[in-house]
Image (cartoon, rainbow, N blue to C red):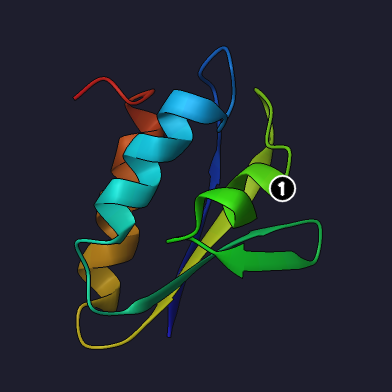
Amino acid sequence: MVSSEVAVQNSVGLHARPATFFIQRANEFKSSIWVEKDERRVNAKSLLGVLSLGIVKGTSISIIADGSDEEEAVKTLVELIESNFSE
């Protein structure tokens, strides 16, 4: 199991369009992936789950993965967030 903490800095947080990009990228991996905010953990491959966290600009979240490609999954998703979804 691998995890990393990252602060969301894009203007709308992890909502609607950025969340969709995030989920699409998460679904490219075989590992189980979660997003955790304030002790609440949701499936990173679920739009409703991610949106339910209400992640706004400046929020710190943890990305956690467990599986065969866990390290690559966490690294890729952290980079996506750090790039403000502008890849």
- Judged left or right of residue 65, residue 37 is right
Q: Quadrant of the N terminus?
A: bottom left
Residue 79 image position (x, y, % from top left): 30, 41
Residue at image x 58%, y 58%? 62
Vertical arrangement, residue 8 with respect to residue 12, above or below? below
* Residue at x 42% of width, y 61% of height: 45
Relative to 38, residue 7 above or below:
above
- Above or below 8: residue 50: below
Q: How many marks?
A: 1
- Residue 4 drawn at (x, y percent): 48, 61
Tell me the element at label 1: helix
Q: Crowding at label 1, few (<14), some or many (≥20) Cα neighbours within 10 Å?
A: few
Residue at the spot of label 1: 52
* Residue depicted at 43% across the width and 29% down the height: 18
Residue closest to the far top: 11
Picture coordinates of residue 83, whole percent (x, y): 32, 26
Q: Residue furthest right?
A: 38
| Coordinates of residue 11 in the picture (x, y in percent) | 56, 12
Q: Is residue 4 above or below residue 76?
A: below
Q: State the image quarter where residue 17 is shown.
A: top left
- Picture residue at 52% right of the left edge, 28% below the top: 16
**Amino acid on which the number 1 mark rests in the picture:** Ser
Find the residue positioned furthest to the front.
Answer: 48
Tell me the quarter of the image containing the C terminus.
top left
- Using the image as rendered, state which of residue 29 and residue 66 is in the foreground: 29
